[in-house]
């Protein structure tokens, strides 16, 4: 047994030494270079090796990196320690960076109202335009600008705390490009723009993609700089076996790996200490295995302690001075400049960003303001620099406008009220007016309906909009039997302005047409012209499973303006308020307050408040109330309080419990207002899928003998 252990130990030593160049002689006062390979999530192992170098105090004189190696290497070159980079990696949601979702909280009210599609297909010159990648890389800009703010004024990478260079590939020529000067963030993004995953990055007159397509393990560029000892972190793995090549992604990766493997072998002769972590079972997208990959790099780096400890030591502990979190990197922005803006000018940009000049800004605040601009859907990508000039700073925006004006969109939904529906949509931008948006929905299925939205968005200046909808639905009783069939068509025109960036205020006039009958009998047809005012806000972070933010929809209207007796005209005021409060990382609480009052007598039945069912469609004075069938309860005045405790687990799974109670009364008086007429409890299991929400709900009323109700919801509401 002892002999076996000795043999294993000797074999391990031989394996380590096989990764150190044969007959390696460390010269006096050697210059040390660090070569970090690309490999997506596998590149987290670089951080483990950096922690080993930090623990030994090794002095690194130059860093080269490709793709993830460029990101990690750029951070280390900018003064971050291995432990600090580890914290950044562990705190970052890389899936979110790749998917690059637009911020719902920063979206316009119009975009929030039409946020319900599975697929959006841009049309250019009458032809379908396919996307160039999954992600534009916009969220990468926000993250990297914030991380590299301490070296934002350095455009010569040799002037960084540790000189640095990164490798990208010119998409037009196929040649390797080494970036040593320019915009550090833009250069790193070019080096890591993996084809189909990230959009190519434009620098100067050329466009670039991931450096892995030419040189994934950039050791030779360090030797060309006169580096004596190159330490390399090699992420190269064996090619996949036949049984693993079962889909288009694995086959594409295999083809790319052919070239990477060939070039990596060439780079070995320029690498003096080749550290190759054990990454078996890991892939470029193993972002859930961050800790395991980090630890593999650290464990492999520790095996080289003896040789690494012989290298020169740096005479100081930290490369990057700690910054004051209050006063550091605060800039006075005096003006802005646009590069690439042909359709939208400075005034539009300033208005959408909510940027007043001059003003004090940080990189974090600028990121949020640019996110508002991106959320308009009028830009494909925005990069920026803060440039000092003549004792002033100006914000230079490099914008790539979205020139597509026409879109075809598709949605799919099922609920217990409208049943199955296939949504077909045409959307258009800049129709008649530059700031205009048009959306036309046609729903085919069990309950056909349509929605038309057209709005001219002028930001703080009042904009003009037109809305039209038509639908039919069935009202139920306590036994879940149909008691009435309605048709409802609405046309309205309104003006709307933005107040304090979060509120939409306005007013308009609507025309409602109602038709009702049951089994061909008791037919009623009525028309109403109703002026109204409204206040809206929606800062919820998610439409289907919100955990923070508020939602407000308040409205006051005069019912039947053309009624001859002015004194008999009816006024209705209602408000729907939802407050989402995060309790912890997984738990959140939602309070929904809904109230409506009627001032006047003889309210038409079509404007009564009707509660029951689970739905989110905008329907007259109907309101969701679990435990009851659709529109089962009706009254002239209502107060509804709903409480939800939501638990999130495994990223996209949710469980929530609900307790709701309501007061329904025909008169407005204190005695009726404090009574609780109806209450219910409910439990919902949900999943946030790429195709929209999936929810299964069971709810039960508490104050009568009505049986419990199961509900299924699939897809976005429409």
Image: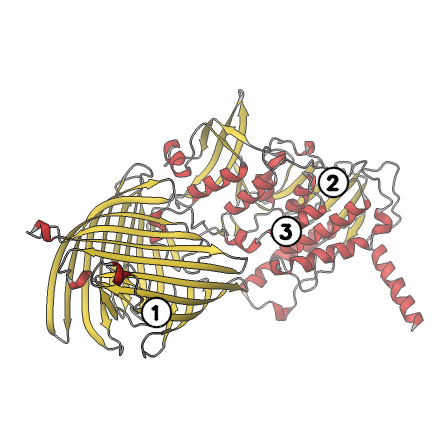
Residue 129, relative to residue 28: is it above or below? below
Circle 3: element type: helix
Q: How far is mark 3 from mark 1, CA to CA?
A: 47 Å
Q: Look at discs 1 and 2 and give the one toward the viewer.
A: 1
- Looking at the rendered structure, which numbered label has been put on residue 13? none
Q: Position of residue 361 (x, y in %)?
A: 51, 33
Q: Left or right? Give the position of 137 relative to 620.
A: right
> Which residue is label 3 attached to?
89
Q: Residue at x 89, y 48 (%)?
A: 23
Residue 180, relative to residue 98: is it above or below? above
Q: Residue at x 76, y 41 (%)?
A: 33
Q: Quadrant of residue 327?
A: top right
* Crowding near the residue tagged with mark 3, few <14, some 14–19, many ≥20 C-alpha atoms within 10 Å: some
Question: Is residue 717 visible in this depiction of the protein?
Answer: no
Image quadrant containing the C terminus: bottom left
Q: Position of residue 99 (x, y in %)?
A: 50, 54
Q: Position of residue 107 (x, y in %)?
A: 40, 47
> Which residue is label 1 attached to?
679
Residue at the extreme front: 671
Q: Look at discs 3 and 1 and give the one toward the viewer.
A: 1
Residue at the extreme left: 564
* Crowding near the residue tagged with mark 1, few <14, some 14–19, many ≥20 C-alpha atoms within 10 Å: many
Residue 224, relative to residue 648: is it above or below? above
Front residue of 54/564: it is 564
Q: How far is mark 1 from mark 2, CA to CA?
A: 72 Å
Front residue of 567/339: it is 567
> Which residue is label 2 attached to?
222
């Amino acid at each position: 047994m002892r002999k076996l252990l000795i043999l294993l130990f000797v074999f391990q030593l031989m394996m380590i030494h096989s990764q150190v160049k044969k007959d390696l002689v460390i010269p006096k006062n050697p210059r040390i270079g660090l070569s970090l390979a690309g490999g997506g999530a596998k590149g987290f192992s670089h951080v483990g090796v950096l922690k080993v170098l930090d623990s030994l105090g090794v002095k690194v004189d130059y860093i080269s990196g490709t793709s993830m190696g460029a990101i990690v290497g750029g951070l280390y070159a900018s003064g971050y320690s291995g432990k600090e980079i580890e914290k950044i990696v562990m705190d970052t949601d890389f899936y979110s960076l790749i998917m690059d979702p637009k911020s719902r909280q920063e979206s316009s009210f119009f975009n929030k109202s039409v946020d319900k599609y599975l697929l959006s297909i841009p049309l250019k010159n009458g032809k379908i335009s396919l996307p160039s990648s999954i992600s534009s890389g916009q969220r990468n800009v926000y993250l990297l600008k914030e991380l590299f703010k301490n070296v934002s004024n350095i455009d010569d990478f040799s002037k960084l705390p540790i000189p640095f260079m990164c490798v990208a590939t010119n998409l037009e020529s196929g040649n390797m490009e080494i970036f040593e000067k320019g915009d550090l963030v833009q250069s790193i993004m070019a080096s890591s723009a993996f084809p189909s995953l990230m959009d190519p990055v434009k620098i100067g007159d050329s466009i670039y993609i991931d450096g892995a397509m030419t040189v994934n393990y950039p050791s030779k560029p360090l030797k060309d700089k006169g580096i004596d000892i190159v330490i390399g972190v090699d992420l190269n793995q064996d090619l996949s076996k036949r049984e693993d090549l079962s889909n288009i992604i694995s086959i594409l990766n295999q083809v790319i790996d052919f070239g990477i493997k060939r070039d990596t072998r060439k780079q070995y002769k320029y690498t003096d200490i080749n550290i190759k972590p054990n990454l078996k079972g890991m892939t470029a997208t193993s972002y859930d295995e961050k800790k395991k990959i980090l630890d593999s790099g650290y464990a492999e780096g520790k095996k080289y302690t003896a040789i690494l400890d012989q290298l020169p030591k740096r005479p100081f502990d930290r490369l990057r001075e700690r910054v004051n979190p209050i006063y550091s990197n605060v800039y006075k922005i005096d003006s802005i400049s646009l590069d690439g803006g042909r359709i939208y000018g400075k005034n539009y940009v300033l208005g959408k960003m909510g940027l007043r000049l001059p003003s004090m800004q940080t990189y974090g605040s600028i990121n949020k303001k640019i996110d508002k601009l991106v959320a308009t859907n009028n830009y494909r990508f925005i990069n920026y620099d803060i440039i000092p000039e003549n004792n002033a700073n100006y914000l230079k925006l490099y914008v790539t406008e979205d020139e597509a004006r026409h879109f075809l969109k598709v949605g799919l939904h099922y609920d217990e009220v409208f049943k199955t529906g296939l949504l077909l949509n045409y959307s258009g931008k800049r129709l008649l007016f530059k700031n205009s948006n048009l959306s036309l929905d046609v729903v085919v299925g069990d309950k056909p309906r349509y929605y038309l939205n057209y709005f001219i968005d002028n930001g703080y200046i009042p904009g003009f909009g037109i809305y039209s909808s038509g639908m039919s639905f069935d009202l139920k009783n306590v036994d879940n039997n149909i008691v009435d069939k309605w048709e409802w068509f609405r046309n309205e025109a309104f003006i709307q302005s933005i107040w304090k960036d979060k509120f939409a205020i306005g007013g308009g006039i609507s025309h409602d047409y109602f038709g009702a009958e049951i089994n061909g009998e008791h037919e009623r047809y009525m028309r109403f012209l109703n002026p109204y005012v409204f206040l809206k806000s929606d800062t919820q972070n998610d439409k289907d499973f919100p955990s923070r933010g508020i939602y407000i929809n308040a409205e006051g209207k005069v019912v039947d303006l053309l009624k001859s007796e002015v004194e008999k005209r009816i006024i209705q005021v209602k408000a729907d308020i939802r407050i989402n409060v995060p309790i912890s990382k997984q738990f959140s609480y939602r309070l929904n307050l809904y109230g409506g009052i009627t001032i006047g007598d003889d309210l038409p039945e079509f404007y009564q408040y009707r509660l029951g069912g689970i739905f989110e469609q905008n329907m007259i004075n109907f309101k969701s109330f679990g435990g009851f069938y659709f529109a089962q309860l009706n009254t002239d005045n209502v107060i509804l309080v709903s409480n939800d405790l939501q638990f999130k687990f495994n990223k996209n799974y949710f469980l929530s419990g609900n307790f709701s109670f309501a007061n329904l009364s025909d008169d407005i008086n204190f005695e009726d207002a404090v009574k609780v007429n109806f209450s219910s409890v409910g439990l919902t299991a949900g999943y946030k899928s790429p195709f929209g929400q999936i929810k299964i709900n069971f709810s039960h009323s508490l104050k009568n003998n009505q049986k419990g109700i199961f509900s299924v919801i699939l897809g976005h509401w429409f």
